[in-house]
Structure formats: C-alpha cells, structure tokens
C-alpha cells in the first residue's frame, strides 16, 4: 500500500533562488511526520506544492498513489490544511465558514458534521460569531475544525498551535494524535516548538536551504548527532548546517 503522501525529487525555484531542492520523503499511514527547519528552509513552499497552490518545477507528488498532477481533484478532496497565516473569512460566522467548506468538500450530512466539530472543538458559544471578531486562539481552533471537516486522509498543519495557550495547545495535540492513530490518515506537521514536536511526531525531517539534511525519531535523533535536545539540534541546523554534513 502506498503512503498517504509520497514526494519524489521535488524542486521549486524563484528565479535564481532555490526554495526546495530535490527533496524526497513519505508520510505513512497513521504517521505524524514533523517537517522542521529555520525560516526560509522550504517548509511552507513544500506544503504549498502539496496543496496544489504552487506548481513544482520538477518532481512528483502522490496522495495514496494518485498523482497530484493528473488526479488533482481526487487527491485534494482527501487533503486539508490549517495554518496561522491562512485565516478563515472574517465576515462569516464560525458555522457559516464550516458550512461553506463542508459544501466545497462535498461532505455528506454537513449539518451533522458541523455540529460534531463544534462540540469536539468547544465552539458552541462561538457558533454565531464572525471569525474576524475572534481571538487568535479561537480562530486557530476554528481553522483546525475546518481542517477536519472532510475527514481528510492527509492533514497538513503549519504551526497549528502557535496562537494557543498551553492548555488549549495540549488538547489540540492530543486530538491530532488521536486523528492519526485512527483510520489510515497521516499528518505533515511543521512547528518551531521542539517540545511539541517530540511529544507528537513519530518521525522528523530537518530542512536546510531547501534540502533534507537529516531525519529520524525525534526522541533519539539529537543524541545521534551529539546534541542533548531537539532544540539544540534545531539551532545547529539553523546556524551551522555544514557541521552536520550538508554538502
């Protein structure tokens, strides 16, 4: 069975600046894969290509064995996304936003699904409030509910808990871990919170200058490279990638 997401030799450049330089990786079923690296490493560009927002210069993207290039509608119908820089329309209420996206994804019994998500994400008191009037943490919860509306096979999360307080962030992490454990879905997760990454990710990849520098189990990877913590390894990748063998 193919992975939930399979990327092969993916490349994207903006003029002479190479943002993603021939990377290959998979997200397996029931796996949470952390895509890590400093700002400008190529994480968001990679996610944008998986979402079909950007077209790669070369390489391939497959979702459950179907090429994004030739089966775009089928592939994207099984995908969803949340990020702090992609807020939902602020002039629509929480319920209206969930309904719009539910209809876009062709969700059956959409009203029942909306009620289920409003309960799961503790959004009842916000149901009829416009998203633009919500706090950043509340908007994040709504965005995550939207990301679950179609029961995605691949969930893409770019800094999903960045605006949440510690208690809410812990609850969201637990919910996403539960999502990955059930069914056959997978998660591609970016974060600068290394504690969070160690807690939720089964495997991590470090990007530097658009290339995959290293990867492995986030709990054991630091020790394999002479570091005490994942945060220390992250800082080394950001500041001194050549010391870790980037050629």
Image (cartoon, rainbow, N blue to C red):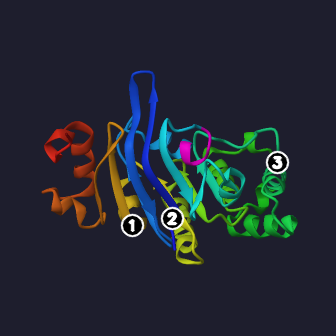
Q: Which mark is residue 108?
A: none
Q: Assess whether residue 4 is covered by the magenta stretch.
A: no
Magenta-colored segment: predominant secondary structure: loop
> Can residue 175 be seen in the rendering of this structure?
yes
Q: In front: 74, or 78?
A: 74
Q: Residue at x 48, y 58 (%)?
A: 6
Could you tell me which secondary element the residue under label 2 belongs to?
helix
Q: Residue at x 84, y 51 (%)?
A: 96
Q: Which residue is mark 1?
A: 199
Question: Which residue is rendered at x = 69% and y = 69% of the image?
Answer: 120
**Direction top: furthest residue:** 15
Q: Which residue is mark 2?
A: 173
- Among the 4 quarters of the image, the one containing residue 63: bottom right
Secondary structure beneath label 3: loop
**Residue 196 appears in which quarter of the rendering?**
bottom left
From the viewer's perspective, is residue 181 above or below residue 61? Answer: below
Q: CA distance from mark 3 to mark 1?
A: 33 Å
- For residue 98, side relative to residue 167 (left or right): right
- Estimate the spatial distance between the alpha carbons at disc 3 and disc 2, rounded to whole Å: 25 Å
Q: Describe residue 216's horizontal placement relative to residue 25 as left or right.
A: left
What is the secondary structure assignment of the residue under circle 1?
Answer: helix
- The foreground one among 243 and 170 is 243
Magenta segment = 49-53
User: For mark 3, what is the residue?
Assistant: 93
Residue 156 on image: x %, y %: 56, 54
Q: Is residue 50 magenta?
A: yes
């Amino acid at each position: 069975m193919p992975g939930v997401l399979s990327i092969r030799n993916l490349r994207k450049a903006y003029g002479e600046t190479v943002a993603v330089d021939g990377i290959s990786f998979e997200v397996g079923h029931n796996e949470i894969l952390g895509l890590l690296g400093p700002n400008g490493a190529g994480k968001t560009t990679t996610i944008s290509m998986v979402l079909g927002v950007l077209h790669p210069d070369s390489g391939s993207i497959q979702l459950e064995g179907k090429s994004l290039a030739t089966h775009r509608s089928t592939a994207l119908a099984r995908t969803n996304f949340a990020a702090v820089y992609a807020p939902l329309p602020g002039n629509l209420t929480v319920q209206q936003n969930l309904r719009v996206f539910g209809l876009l994804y062709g969700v059956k019994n959409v009203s029942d699904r909306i009620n289920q998500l409003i309960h799961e994400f503790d959004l009842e008191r916000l149901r009829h409030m416009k998203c633009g009037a919500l706090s950043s943490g509340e908007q994040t919860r709504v965005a995550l509910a939207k990301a679950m509306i179609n029961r995605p096979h691949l969930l893409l999360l770019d800094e999903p808990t960045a605006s949440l307080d510690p208690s809410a962030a812990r609850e969201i992490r637990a919910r996403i871990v539960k999502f990955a454990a059930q069914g056959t879905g997978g998660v591609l997760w970016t974060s600068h919170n290394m504690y969070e990454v160690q807690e939720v990710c089964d495997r991590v990849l470090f990007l530097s200058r658009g290339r995959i520098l290293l990867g492995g189990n986030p709990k054991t990877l630091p020790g394999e490279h002479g570091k005490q913590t994942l945060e220390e390894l992250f800082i080394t990748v950001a500041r001194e990638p050549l010391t870790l063998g980037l050629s």
